[in-house]
Image (spheres, helix red, strand yellow):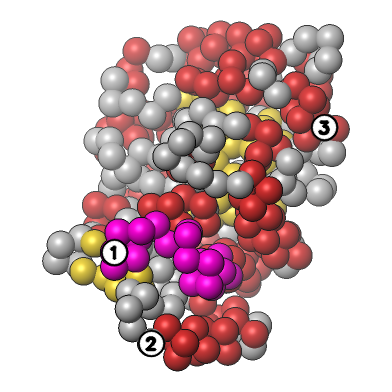
């Protein structure tokens, strides 16, 4: 991995805006080096994070009126799976596009960058819903999480992978390097009695997605906005660990050996140090710098040096802002930008 982050700023995908171009302009103004295309859930159900990447997956059913997504395993799955794997094995990435009706923000950002790419842009960030969160959240027709249907889940993992690779290919058309985050909120439930998942299987599933994106030249991050068993993510092949550093930095300190190994291999920490709360006005660059330095102190000790922790960092909000007001989302983005500039020195 040849990328020195140096406190560059980016964001998690969702925004509350209902005008795609407006959202993109605000993003480019505040995140000129790693802009992100915006997910816009208030535009409609198709921009829901679990629906947005479902287009073309076998046996998927959308009930737009009632805002429900599920997989119908009662039908003839063999025919749909055969058609899916024919597409997958053709290795034609264009067959896995995310269409405009599912992602207005992607197309708006691509159109702007096509006309006016700034030399400051180092990467463009995209995202997909991570396979574990997708598999645990979306169910079959009986209400069983689709992750427990091994045959169908394998196709879903491959479909999500191709959606990510399609983004990287589109970024490359503009001469831009791509960064993809796998959004994995459900990993905060890993290890509980209600989510019986094997650690080895989780790592294997994530690595299938991660390695395929890396093989076509993309950098890959995994974002978890809650507490989790961080050793799971630190043991994957991921390039960037994106975490809620505002609320959960201390939990990362419980895995010093895994963290040290991750950093020694060139791993990047994306510090979600700007809280995604409506009452963001109580925070300032000064208070967030103090919180960041306290976080570094809590992670650094004889085993991991401060220098190792700070030499390769990305600054982000703690999560997406899709559920907030536009004013709060824009304040969060501005704070992220200013904090990044301050830490760069």
> Secondary structure beneath disc 1?
loop
* Residue shown at 70% from the left, 65% from the top: 212
User: Where does label 3 land, which residue?
Assistant: 261
Q: Earlier in the sequence, mark 1 or mark 3?
A: 1
Q: Is residue 210 visible?
A: no
Q: Nearer the viewer, residue 118 or 301?
A: 301
Give the total of numbered labels.
3
Locate residue 22, reporting x and y percent: 33, 51
- Cα distance between the residues tagged 1 and 2: 16 Å
Percent coordinates x, y for residue 291 in the rendering: 54, 12
Q: Residues within 10 Å of mark 1 (few under 14, many from 20)?
A: few
Q: Secondary structure at mark 3?
A: helix
Position of residue 181 measured from the top left corner of the image (x, y, whole percent)? 57, 49
Q: Is residue 81 visible?
A: yes
Please provide the residue range marked out in magenta.
138-158
Label 3 vs label 2, nearer the camera: 2
Report how far apart the C-alphas of labels 3 and 2 lie in the structure: 46 Å
Q: Is residue 70 magenta?
A: no
C-alpha distance separating marks 1 and 3: 42 Å
What SS does tag 2 mark? loop
Q: Which residue is mark 1?
A: 142
Q: Which mark is residue 76?
A: 2
């Amino acid at each position: 991995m040849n990328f020195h982050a140096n406190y560059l700023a980016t964001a998690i995908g969702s925004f509350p805006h209902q005008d795609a171009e407006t959202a993109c302009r605000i993003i480019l103004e505040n995140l000129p080096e790693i802009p992100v295309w915006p997910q816009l859930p208030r535009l409609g159900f198709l921009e829901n994070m679990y629906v947005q990447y479902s287009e073309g997956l076998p046996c998927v059913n959308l009930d737009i009126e009632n805002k429900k997504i599920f997989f119908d395993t009662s039908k003839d799955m063999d025919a749909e799976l055969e058609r899916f794997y024919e597409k997958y094995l053709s290795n034609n990435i264009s067959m896995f596009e995310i269409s405009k009706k599912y992602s207005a923000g992607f197309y708006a950002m691509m159109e702007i960058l096509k006309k006016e790419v700034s030399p400051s842009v180092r990467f463009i960030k995209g995202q997909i819903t991570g396979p574990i969160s997708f598999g645990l959240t979306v169910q079959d027709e009986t209400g069983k999480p689709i992750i427990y249907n091994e045959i169908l889940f394998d196709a879903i993992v491959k479909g999500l992978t191709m959606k990510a690779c399609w983004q990287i290919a589109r970024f490359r058309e503009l001469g831009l390097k791509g960064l993809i985050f796998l959004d994995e909120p459900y990993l905060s439930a890993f290890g509980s009695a209600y989510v019986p998942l094997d650690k080895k299987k989780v790592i294997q599933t994530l690595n299938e997605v991660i390695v395929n994106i890396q093989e076509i030249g993309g950098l890959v991050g995994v974002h978890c906005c809650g507490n989790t068993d961080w050793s799971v993510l630190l043991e994957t092949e991921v390039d960037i660990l994106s975490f809620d550093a505002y609320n959960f930095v201390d939990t990362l300190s419980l895995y010093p050996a895994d963290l040290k190994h991750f950093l020694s291999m060139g791993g990047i920490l994306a510090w979600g140090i700007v809280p995604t709360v409506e009452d963001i006005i109580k925070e300032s660059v000064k208070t967030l710098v103090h919180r960041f330095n306290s976080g570094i102190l809590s992670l650094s000790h004889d085993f991991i040096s401060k220098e190792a922790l700070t030499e390769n960092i990305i600054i982000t909000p703690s999560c997406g802002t899709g559920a907030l007001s536009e004013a709060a989302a824009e304040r969060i983005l501005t704070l992220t930008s200013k904090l990044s500039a301050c830490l760069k020195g």
